[in-house]
Image (cartoon, rainbow, N blue to C red):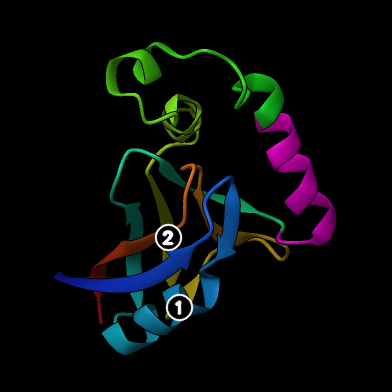
Amino acid sequence: MAVITDYIPISTKGFTDIIDITPEIRASLKNSKLRSGTLTVFISGSTAGVTTIEYEPGLLKDLPEALEKIAPQDKRYHHDDTWGDGNGFSHVRAAMVGCSLTVPFTEGRLLLGTWQQVAVIDFDNRSRQREVVVQIMGEE
């Protein structure tokens, strides 16, 4: 059993910026030379999340609209009262989506569905430089 850790730097715009990182994850898996196991994607920070989505124009509009209904930007958040940074909505959204995702792989191939991509969503109220951690556990 081997454990390999890789890092993917990304630049985000914030405000529910959705970034498809599937090609970078596939490259990390290929470079690992592992054939079977699990791959975990983790985004550091408390204002971003990782999920799967069909990365197409309609859903790239639908998901932010749905999140705006659940945790609107213009609502008063106690976090903002505490820190004054205006990103309480970002923390709520990130907590709901989650900071990590595990994907199984076999024969060196991610077992994602046909229309399923791995995406990082940056909910913060400003652009950010982020680092995605990819940890691959498996066998050759």
- What is the crowding at mark 2: few (fewer than 14 residues within 10 Å), some, or many (at least 20)? some
Q: Residue 66: horizontal and vertical position, in percent? A: 72, 31
Q: Residue 122: horizontal and vertical position, in percent? A: 49, 49
Q: Hey, what amino acid is under mark 2? A: Pro
| Circle 1 or circle 2, nearest the eye | 1
In this rendering, is residue 8 above or below 12?
below
- Front residue of 10/5: it is 10
Is 121 placed left or right of 33 in the picture?
right
Q: Are marks 1 and 2 in contact (CB under 8 Å)?
A: no
Q: Residue drawn at (60%, 56%), measured in percent from left and top?
A: 18
Can residue 33 be seen here? no
| N-terminal label among 1 and 2 | 1
On residue 24, the disc is 1
On residue 104, the disc is 2
Q: Residue drawn at (39%, 20%), measured in percent from left and top?
A: 80
Q: Residue 78: horizontal and vertical position, in percent? A: 39, 11
Judged from the image, the secondary structure of the residue bearing numbered disc 1 is helix
Q: Which residues are magenta?
A: 55-67
Please name the predominant secondary structure of the magenta segment in the image: helix
Instruction: Identify the image quadrant of residue 106.
Output: bottom left
Is residue 59 covered in magenta? yes
Is 56 placed left or right of 24 in the picture?
right
Can residue 82 be seen here? yes
In this rendering, is residue 71 above or below 38?
above
- What is the crowding at mark 1: few (fewer than 14 residues within 10 Å), some, or many (at least 20)? some
